[in-house]
Image (cartoon, helix red, strand yellow):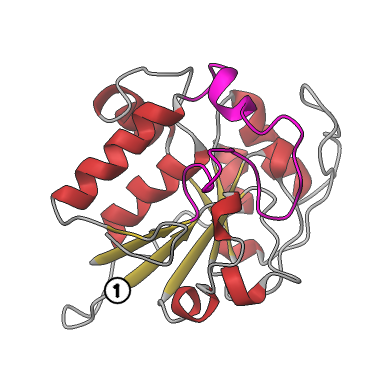
C-alpha cells in the first residue's frame, strides 16, 4: 500500500462539491441492446459517462456516444486511455495492486493468470482504486453472494449511486432476441455470461429493477424507452 500511494493519488476527488450542483451520471454497459438505439447524444449529455472493460466507442458513436469520463477495469481488461479519463481499478486480488504500480513504473508484471498490459498509458493523477471493502459491501449487501463476485457493471452502478444525484443506466441485459453479447462483436456464445457462474446476471437485473421502482436510477432499454 505504501508503494501504491507513492504512485497514485491518495485523495478523494469527490470530497468537495458544490452543493447546488446536481451531478448527472450515465453508466454505459456493453450489451448488444445498444445497437441501433440512437442513445449516443443522450449518453453524452451527462456530466460523467462511465464505461467498463474493453468498451469501444469508435464506429458506434450514434448508439453509445463518444464521451468517457471513467473506465472501470481490472488488469486483465485494462487498456490505454486518452487524457482526462479516470481509470478506476477494481482489485480482485493482491496482485492487482502490484500490477497498477508496475504498469505505471517498471512494467515488470506482464502476466497474472493471462497476459496483461505491462505498461499503461493514461493520466496518472486520474487513477482511482476501489477499496476492497466496497466490493465486499456490494457482495454482502446487494448481490448477496449470488455469483462469485459482482459484475463490473453492477460495481459501476453502485459507485455512481454514491457520488451522483441522478443515475441513468444504458446497455444492460440481453438484446431483443434474448442474447447476451457485446455491441461491438458477434459472439457465438452469447449466453456465456449467464452460464459461467462468475456473475448472476438475472439476480443483478432484479437489483436494477428494484432500483428503478424506488426511483434511484433511470433505466433505458433496447426499444428506446426509459423506465
Asked if residue 171 is positioned above or below residue 193 in the image, the reply reads below
Q: Is residue 157 above or below residue 163?
A: above
Q: Quadrant of residue 145?
A: top left
Residue 198: say if magenta.
Answer: yes
> Which of the image's four quarters has the N terminus?
top right
Question: Residue at 27% across / 53% down in the picture?
Answer: 162
Q: Which residues are magenta?
A: 171-199
> Residue at label 1?
23
Image coordinates for residue 14, horizontal then vertical, percent: 34, 65
Residue 84 visible here: no
Q: Say which quadrant the C terminus sits in.
A: bottom left
Nearer-the-camera pick, 29 or 177: 177
Residue 79 included in the magenta stretch of the image:
no
Relative image position of residue 173 (x, y in whole percent): 47, 43
At x 51% / y 40%, what residue is drawn? 152
- x and y percent of residue 151 in the render? 49, 34
Amino acid at each position: 500500500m505504501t508503494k501504491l500511494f507513492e504512485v497514485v493519488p491518495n485523495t478523494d476527488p469527490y470530497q468537495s462539491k458544490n452543493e447546488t450542483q446536481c451531478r448527472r451520471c450515465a453508466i454505459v454497459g456493453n450489451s448488444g441492446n445498444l445497437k441501433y438505439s440512437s442513445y449516443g447524444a443522450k449518453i453524452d449529455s451527462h456530466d460523467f459517462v462511465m464505461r467498463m472493460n474493453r468498451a469501444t466507442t469508435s464506429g458506434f458513436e450514434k448508439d453509445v456516444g463518444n464521451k468517457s469520463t471513467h473506465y472501470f477495469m481490472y488488469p486483465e481488461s485494462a487498456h490505454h486511455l486518452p487524457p482526462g479519463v479516470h481509470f478506476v481499478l477494481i482489485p480482485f486480488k493482491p496482485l492487482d495492486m502490484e500490477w497498477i504500480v508496475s504498469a505505471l513504473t517498471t512494467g515488470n508484471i506482464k502476466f497474472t493468470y493471462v497476459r496483461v498490459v505491462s505498461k499503461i498509458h493514461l493520466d496518472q493523477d486520474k487513477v482511482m482504486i476501489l477499496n476492497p471493502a466496497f466490493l465486499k459491501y456490494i457482495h454482502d449487501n446487494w448481490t448477496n453472494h449470488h455469483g462469485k463476485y459482482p459484475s463490473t457493471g453492477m460495481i459501476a452502478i453502485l459507485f455512481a449511486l454514491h457520488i451522483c444525484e441522478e443515475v441513468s443506466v444504458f446497455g444492460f441485459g440481453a438484446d431483443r432476441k434474448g442474447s447476451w453479447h457485446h455491441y461491438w462483436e458477434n459472439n457465438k456464445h452469447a449466453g456465456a455470461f449467464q452460464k459461467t457462474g462468475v456473475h448472476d446476471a438475472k439476480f443483478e437485473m432484479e437489483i436494477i429493477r428494484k432500483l428503478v421502482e424506488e426511483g434511484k436510477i433511470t433505466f433505458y432499454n433496447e426499444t428506446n424507452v426509459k423506465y
